[in-house]
Amino acid sequence: MSSHLFTRLFGAAVAVIPLCPTAPAFAENPVHVLEKAVSGAGVSKHLIAFQAIADAHGGNRAAGLPGYAASVDYVAGLLRKAGYEVILQPFRFNFYREIGKPSFERVGAAPYEHPADFSTVEHSGPGDVTAQVQPVDVRLPPDSRPSTSTSGCEPSDFTSFVPGRIALLQRGGCPFRVKATNAVTAGAAAVIIFNEGRPGRTDSFNGSLEEPHSVPVVATSYGIGRELAETRATVRVATQVESESRVSHNVIVQTEHGDPDDVVVVGAHLDSVQEGAGINDNGSGAGAVLEVALAMAEHKPRRAVRFIWWGAEELGLIGSKHYVRALSPQERSKIKLYLNFDMVASPNYIYGIYDGDDSDKVGQGPGPAGSAEIERAFQKYYEKRSLPHMGTDFTGRSDYGPFIEYGIPAGGLFTGGETPKTPAQAALFGGTAGLSYDSCYHRACDDLSNINHTALDVNTDAIASVTATFAWPTAAARSTTPSAPAPRESG
């Protein structure tokens, strides 16, 4: 691995020279050449491979599990055959999964129902505990104002706690991680967190501790929590989980040609959720970016193009956060823009473009300077083909988030997730009003049948076209880039 390439990608001092074939000269517009070199049919071959990988590895391609490792091997193998030098960038993350059904019951009474009455809190420890509950600084009934209960938020809340009991905590006031950590430190054998009790916060709920804990932790409704607080009953809590630190990888390649100080980054997350194969989310985006990267291997862009397949996006953008934060300020300043593709073939699709200029006035506001030009490039693509399009907000839910955090212009496409399509959108794009854009979002049914091939074909061409537009920049495109990205304020 030559230090030159590694330095270009990471700002480190080890070198890698990619082995790409000699690039041909263009007899026509490179945008048209790249667009014609890709197709939805080509991407579909990758989706078939991703489905086969999931089928062979427990039904998913989730980070930390064999299906993701096999997906990395598949993508990296094709890139190597195309002549790229592949870098697998490792990073650590907190892996979690339930491996058996949990139990929660008052001794001598009927068990509570899972998941209607309770859930295992993500990153709970495993265990089977029977002990008396002890309420810790709970507020019954709750205050009329939100989050006024600070149950378990301070170590001093546990001054009179009896070690070996099950800590009964109320939601509110601080992260679940803080509550559970304080309880474990005080000697709790297990933890029950019940909902706050205000309107909208009464039912059982799902939560996360963010990092592995050593004892069982479950969440339940306000009604059950209040009953346990009043009776101080003896209960059984049993969880069957794996929760530990694991290593995953981002897959990174860069074109041999193009200015390494003027880089276009194109990315898509490669992992699925544990519930399914993730063929739309995000096999569609990962496959489309792969198809464009393979088509681009033989060409000589003016800007270097860096293609990245992110790991552990579904766990909180972990791979992309690691990548961007690990870069030096100098290396970040060389990234002129980032293009993100997450779910580009939803069955009940829209043609959504990230709203870089905030012209829709919805949600989070505009992206960093230059994002509006990226949005406009995609708009021009659709308009040239008389296709409808609409803006979609920078919600922070995908891998563009770490880039815009550092002031790097970003844009991309999104065909919709769990939100229902409106009647106006159905009139514009077709499809079914009232039905989710992707009814199989984060479910086992996100398989090969969960793809709209028209959207896949259109958006694959769009990805190629806009990638080439910025890889062979005009003077106007060059002017969209910022000079010195700086982190955004968090509050």
Image (cartoon, rainbow, N blue to C red):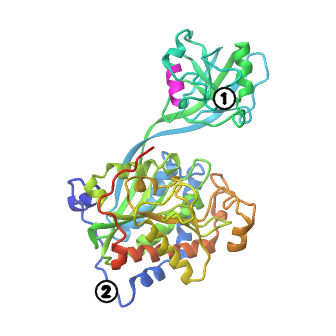
Where residue 107 appears, x then y in whole percent?
A: 74, 16
Task: Tell me the residue at 52%/75% (across/down).
Answer: 379
Q: Is residue 451 visible?
A: yes
Q: In front here: 401 or 483?
A: 483
What amino acid does circle 1 point to? Glu
Location of mark 2 (residue): 25
In this picture, residue 242 sits left or right of residue 8: right
Where does residue 78 sit, x and y in percent of width and height? 42, 67
Instruction: Compare marks 2 and 1 and give the one earlier in the sequence.
Output: 2
Per the rendering, the mark at residue 491 is none
- Estimate the x, y position of residue 79 in percent, counting from the top left: 39, 66
Query: For the point 40% across and 66% down, which residue is it?
Result: 370
In the rendered image, residue 25 lying in the magenta stretch gets the answer: no
Task: Tell me the residue at 24%/65% (across/down).
Answer: 17
Q: Considering the image in quadrants, where does the N terminus appear?
A: bottom left
Indicate the quadrant where residue 386 lies: bottom right
Question: Which region shows up in magenta?
Answer: 177-183
Circle 1 packing at 10 Å, graded few (<14), some (14-19), many (20+), is: many
Q: Nearer the viewer, residue 146 or 338?
A: 146
Asked which quadrant contains residue 448, the reply is bottom right
Residue with the mark numbered 1: 196
